[in-house]
Image (tube, rainbow, N blue to C red):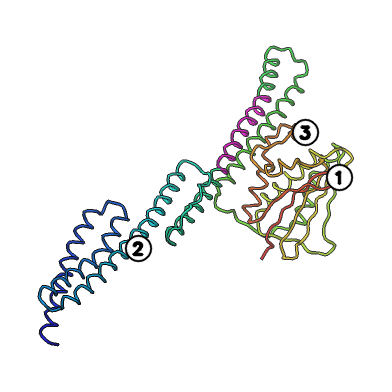
């Protein structure tokens, strides 16, 4: 390599370093400005370094005047192209950034979908926009669940206040009658008071059980439970109640000797099934039947279904049947002072056993179906 080439290389390196230092200083000054400005500076810096090196080479007579003009015109057109491309790219990035900022501000104040962007943005900003939209949907769903839960809590407080106020007023009236000596049948009055206290105790027990299930406590010791035997036991315990209301209670089990065993807490499962059967008996018309059927699905899961003759549930209420305190219309309001917690407790028990519970309308009534994993 001759001496002239070494000189040109040294001058080019020097001017490149000088322009790089100046460009870095300018970028530092504009670090808080728009991305468009910084991208224009970054695009023009290499052109400025090349121009300075060519001008220095011309002055040192390493390049002829004709060749220098060719190189300068070439650099000028390249600089214009670089400027146009940097302006266009800066516009895309700035537009995408404003769209992302708008979505972020919208995300903090509303859960409604933001207007779609009308411009094309880089893939990274488009992916960020998609993530923000997904986050918005999750927040909207969470907000909807929170509102539904808050509405259920308000209904529960209203229902429980009514259910507790009525027996308390009865207890007060009976106690005042006993105190004033205006009640002749004292043993009957005491039995009435005891019945009222038992009903209030049942309400408190339901609230405690629902609270325990809602706080997701550590699982209890579980063992193999035969849903076949459990269904027969519940039917035996609820048979007298069904006969007293004129309802037929029918149990349907498989013809084979399958015990339909699941892994779970027998007391909790018994309470869940009892709640479903009691609810079915309460809302079934006299001379109609409540069917308690158990069986095994093709995938091995164990199924338990309770069908009643309530006449069906309105379609708008099917999604709220298992909500805390839900009672539906007046025809489905518990007549025995129940707090409308039985179905919510049943759902909590089933879900704590990794199962599913659902309700659907069938001919003449509705059917509650439980599916639980089979015992390993």
Residue at the spot of label 1:
289
Question: Which SS class for mark 3?
Answer: helix
Is residue 145 highlighted in magenta? yes
Q: Label 3 near label 2: C-beta < 8 Å?
A: no
Vertical comparison of 106 with 331: above or below:
below
Q: Residue at x 23, y 64 (%)?
A: 45
Q: Nearer the viewer, residue 38 or 246?
A: 38
Q: Which residues are magenta?
A: 144-167
Expressed as whole percent of the image width and height from the top left, the position of residue 308 reads 81, 45
Q: Nearer the viewer, residue 315 or 206?
A: 315
Expressed as whole percent of the image width and height from the top left, the position of residue 99 reads 43, 50
Distance (Cα) linking label 3 and label 1:
18 Å
Query: 10 Å neighbourhood of mark 2: few (<14), some, or many (≥20)?
Result: some
Placement of the C terminus among the 4 image quadrants? bottom right
Query: 10 Å neighbourhood of mark 1: few (<14), some, or many (≥20)?
Result: many
Q: Residue at x 65, y 31 (%)?
A: 159
Q: Residue at x 65, y 49 (%)?
A: 349
Horizontally, residue 68 falls left or right of residue 209, namely left
Query: 10 Å neighbourhood of mark 3: few (<14), some, or many (≥20)?
Result: few
Residue at the spot of label 2:
85
Distance (Cα) linking label 2 and label 3:
72 Å
């Amino acid at each position: 390599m001759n001496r002239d080439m070494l000189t040109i290389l040294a001058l080019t390196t020097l001017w490149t370093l000088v322009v790089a230092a100046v460009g870095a200083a300018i970028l530092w000054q504009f670090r808080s400005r728009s991305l468009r400005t910084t991208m224009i500076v970054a695009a023009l810096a290499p052109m400025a370094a090349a121009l300075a090196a060519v001008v220095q080479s011309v002055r040192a007579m390493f390049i002829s005047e004709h060749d220098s003009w060719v190189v300068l015109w070439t650099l000028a057109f390249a600089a214009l192209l670089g400027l146009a491309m940097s302006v266009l790219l800066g516009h895309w990035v700035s537009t995408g950034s404003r769209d992302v900022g708008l979505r972020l501000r919208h995300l903090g104040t509303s859960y409604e979908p933001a207007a779609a962007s009308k411009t094309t943005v880089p893939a990274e900003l488009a992916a960020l926009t998609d993530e923000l939209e997904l986050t918005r949907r999750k927040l909207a769903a969470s907000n909807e669940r929170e509102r539904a839960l808050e509405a259920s809590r308000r209904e529960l407080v209203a229902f429980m206040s009514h259910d507790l106020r009525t027996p308390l007023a009865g207890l007060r009236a009976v106690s005042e009658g006993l105190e004033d000596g205006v009640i002749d049948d004292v043993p009957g009055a005491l039995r009435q008071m005891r019945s009222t206290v038992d009903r209030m105790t049942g309400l408190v027990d339901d609230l405690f059980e629902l609270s325990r299930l809602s706080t997701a406590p550590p699982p209890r010791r579980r063992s193999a439970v035969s849903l076949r035997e459990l269904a027969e036991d519940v039917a035996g315990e609820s048979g007298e109640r069904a006969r007293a209301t004129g309802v037929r209670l029918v149990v349907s089990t498989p013809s084979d000797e399958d015990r339909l065993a699941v892994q779970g807490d027998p007391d909790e499962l018994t309470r869940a099934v009892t709640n479903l059967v009691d609810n079915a008996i309460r809302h079934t018309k006299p001379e109609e039947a409540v069917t308690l059927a158990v069986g095994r699905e093709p995938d091995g899961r164990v199924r338990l279904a309770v069908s009643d003759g309530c006449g069906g549930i309105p379609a708008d209420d099917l999604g709220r049947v298992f909500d805390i305190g839900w009672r539906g219309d007046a025809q489905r309001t518990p007549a025995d002072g129940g707090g409308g917690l039985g179905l919510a407790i049943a759902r909590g028990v089933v879900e704590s056993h990794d199962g599913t519970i659902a309700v659907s309308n069938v001919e003449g009534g509705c059917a509650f179906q439980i599916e639980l994993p089979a015992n390993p």
